[in-house]
Image (cartoon, coloured by chain):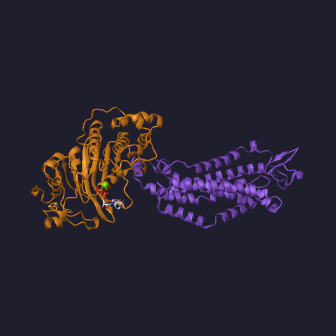
């Protein structure tokens, strides 16, 4: 389990995590509707979209820990080719933290205030305390915590936010999971720390061959670290493809507007995507056709009547828009 | 920074420790055998001494037994009953509260309705009835108090568990594959221990009173074994001739219970986030 980092060969045809046609319902409304994506080992895939578009629910569905109000409809989640929906709850518990891990937005709140750093990081190893300590110390060093021998016995309140997030990452990765889901891991941190944590995630993905799903609503973060990106709007994937391709030539009006809103100077605080006219419709008011129609400058009657399917617009770049060729 | 512990609290703590040590060491510090009767030495006032038997610092009772020794052994009974019954009810009540707060739904409804029902019956009545049915003995006393006093812990554990379960670090523990049992014991329990400790402290004082009350009524510790309640009960007939028989055990009871309650209030103020920073 805790081997030295092996040279990593990307598995191009077998994704570590694949989500097929995921549908999540709240009171019958599909708040997540037909979401598809896959992430390969060593790859960072960003799931980006405005607040409430269903990013966190998608992550929770992958972990099979949905809130009581949310029900999963259709959908299949595969981890290394294994269908997770077929597992019992007991088997699923052994997947969490060992084969798929998750970290969150508020690192300080995500740590038990009464457990030491060492105890929390050791939790996912399942090793007895004495043996775990060595592994924990190595892991703390690997996530860039200086003086791990001192930090290991400290409590969360003694650490800064950035340090807490490093501890969370250590605890998430110590069991060498195939997949790490990071739900806005840097939103609560200030800009310099944010950059450090993103660098760390990037490095760990490459060194350990971890597939990372990075949830964010910040296109700047996407540009910084994602190999690929899936843009979500109101529970559906609007556009997906290589980060470079999408940033160079977005083929969905929503993505184009997000990118237009991105500040050019990197030292300006990043946009929070709140700059597009109008707001996301509530799940109960989702229109029958394209969910972006209410805010889209290119919308016509066809858009309002029929759901645009995700179509290939060139070498793995997909867009769910009837007028994708008109976007510029 | 945490506020410093005040001098008053140190005194309270010292008094409680003094009582506890006296109870623990009763067999070694008692001047006399608490059960040894002597018809010639009946109702001697505090401080009396005889050439053959020595000094009776707090006097003797109606059977000529040394009052100080009986009070020391009585403190033993008080502490034993309070510690054991608080332990039983703390464990039972906390487990039920953790389960109700974690699983919610019908489990919680069932447990919390039962709690409401238990709390609507006067505790002392329940205790008296149960002892009357089972017959008085030390074990009965522990069982009766232990199994009637758990609902308060359940209420507190339930409410605190609901609060703690909603915190992000619990979700994080679930995400890392911990099961319910592990989460409850490793992450929830330590984080709700404060409020439970406050209840346990106030219950501790109450259990000392209950033991004295039940023994006073003849339903607790059985004579000739000494208990503050039964000493006072026996001394009742001699209030005018031998005031010391009611005053000294009464004073002990009063001091100990007040100390424990003050400690409980202080703990509550310190641990209650609403009164933090005052
Ligand atoms: N526990 C819940 N009960 C009911 N509705 C929920 C719950 N959690 C989320 N929702 C709803 O589901 C939808 C998607 O929520 P989700 O948390 O996945 O959004 P998000 O994309 O992660 O947004 P954010 O950027 O704000 O984190 C929202 O409309 C939200 O109101
Ligand atoms: S399908 Fe129509 S409404 Fe939807 S994004 Fe494309 S142009 Fe806009
Ligand atoms: Mg979210």
Which colour represents chain B? purple
Residue B266 is situated, as x and y percent measured from the top left of the image, at 56, 54
| Res. B102 in view | no
Q: Is residue A99 above or below residue A53?
A: above
Quarter holding residue B245: bottom right
Q: Is residue A207 above or below residue B233?
A: above
Q: Quadrant of ligand 2?
A: bottom left
> Is residue A188 or residue B126 the one in the foreground?
A188
Number of numbered labels in the structure image: 0
> Is residue B1 or residue B179 the one in the foreground?
B1
Residue A36 is situated, as x and y percent measured from the top left of the image, at 25, 53
| Residue at figure coordinates x 23%, y 42% from the top left | A13
In this rendering, position of residue A294 left or right of residue A188: left
Q: Which chain is orange?
A: A
> Is residue A315 or residue B14 the one in the foreground?
B14
Q: Is residue A159 above or below residue B247?
A: above
Quarter holding residue B154: bottom right
| Res. A37 in view | yes
Residue A205 is situated, as x and y percent measured from the top left of the image, at 28, 40
In this rendering, position of residue A130 left or right of residue B134: left
Quarter holding residue A150: top left
Residue A82 is situated, as x and y percent measured from the top left of the image, at 33, 46
| Residue at figure coordinates x 41%, y 43% from the top left | A158
């Amino acid at each position: 389990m805790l081997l030295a980092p092996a040279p990593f060969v990307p598995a191009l045809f077998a994704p570590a995590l694949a989500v097929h046609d995921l549908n999540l319902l709240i009171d019958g409304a599909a708040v997540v509707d037909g979401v598809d994506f896959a992430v390969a080992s060593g790859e960072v895939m960003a799931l980006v979209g405005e607040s409430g578009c269903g990013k966190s629910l998608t992550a929770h569905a992958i972990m099979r820990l949905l809130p009581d109000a949310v029900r999963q409809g259709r959908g299949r989640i595969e981890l290394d080719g294994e269908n997770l929906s077929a597992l019992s709850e007991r088997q699923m518990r052994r997947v969490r933290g060992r084969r798929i891990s998750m970290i969150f937005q508020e690192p300080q709140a995500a740590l038990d205030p009464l457990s030491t750093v060492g105890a929390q990081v050791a939790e996912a190893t399942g090793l007895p305390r004495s043996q775990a300590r060595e592994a924990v110390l190595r892991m703390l060093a690997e996530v860039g915590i200086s003086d791990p021998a001192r930090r290991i016995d400290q409590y969360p309140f003694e650490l800064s936010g950035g340090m807490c997030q490093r501890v969370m990452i250590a605890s998430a990765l110590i069991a060498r999971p195939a997949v790490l889901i990071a739900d806005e891991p840097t939103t609560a941190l200030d800009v310099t720390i944010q950059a450090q944590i993103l660098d760390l995630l990037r490095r760990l993905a490459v060194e350990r061959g971890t597939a990372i799903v990075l949830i964010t609503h910040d296109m700047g973060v996407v540009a910084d670290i994602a190999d690929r990106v899936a843009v979500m709007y109101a529970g559906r994937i609007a556009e997906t493809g290589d980060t470079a391709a999408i940033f160079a030539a977005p083929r969905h009006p929503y993505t184009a507007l997000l990118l237009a809103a991105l500040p050019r100077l990197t030292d300006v605080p990043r946009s929070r995507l709140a700059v597009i006219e109008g707001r996301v419709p509530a799940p109960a008011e989702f229109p029958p056709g394209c969910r972006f129609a209410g805010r889209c400058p290119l919308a016509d009657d066809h858009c309002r009547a029929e759901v645009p399917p995700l179509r290939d617009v060139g070498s793995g770049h997909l867009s769910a828009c009837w007028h994708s060729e008109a976007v510029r | 920074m945490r506020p410093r512990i005040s001098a008053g609290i140190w005194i309270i703590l010292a008094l409680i420790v003094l009582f506890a040590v006296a109870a623990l060491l009763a067999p070694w510090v008692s001047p006399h055998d608490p059960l040894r009767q002597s018809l010639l030495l009946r109702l001697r006032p505090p401080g009396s001494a005889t050439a053959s038997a020595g000094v009776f610092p707090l006097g003797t009772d109606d059977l000529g037994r040394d009052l100080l020794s009986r009070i020391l052994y009585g403190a033993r009974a008080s502490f034993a009953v309070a510690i054991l019954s608080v332990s039983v009810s703390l464990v039972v009540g906390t487990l039920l509260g953790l389960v109700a707060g974690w699983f919610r739904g019908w489990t919680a409804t069932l447990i919390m309705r039962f709690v409401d029902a238990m709390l609507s019956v006067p505790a002392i009545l329940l205790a008296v009835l149960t002892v009357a049915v089972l017959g008085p003995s030390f074990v009965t006393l522990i069982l009766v108090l232990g199994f009637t006093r758990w609902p308060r812990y359940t209420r507190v554990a339930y409410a605190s568990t609901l609060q703690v379960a909603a915190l992000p670090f619990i979700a994080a523990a679930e995400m890392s594959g911990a099961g319910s049992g592990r989460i409850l014991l490793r992450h929830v329990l330590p984080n709700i221990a404060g409020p439970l400790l406050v209840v346990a402290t106030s219950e501790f004082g109450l259990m000392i009173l209950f033991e004295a009350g039940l023994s006073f009524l003849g339903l607790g510790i059985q004579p000739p074994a000494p208990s503050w309640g039964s000493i006072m009960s026996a001394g009742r007939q001699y209030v005018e001739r031998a005031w010391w028989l009611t005053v000294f055990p009464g004073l002990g009871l009063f001091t100990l219970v007040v100390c424990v309650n003050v400690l409980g209030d202080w703990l509550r103020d310190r641990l209650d986030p609403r009164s933090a920073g005052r």
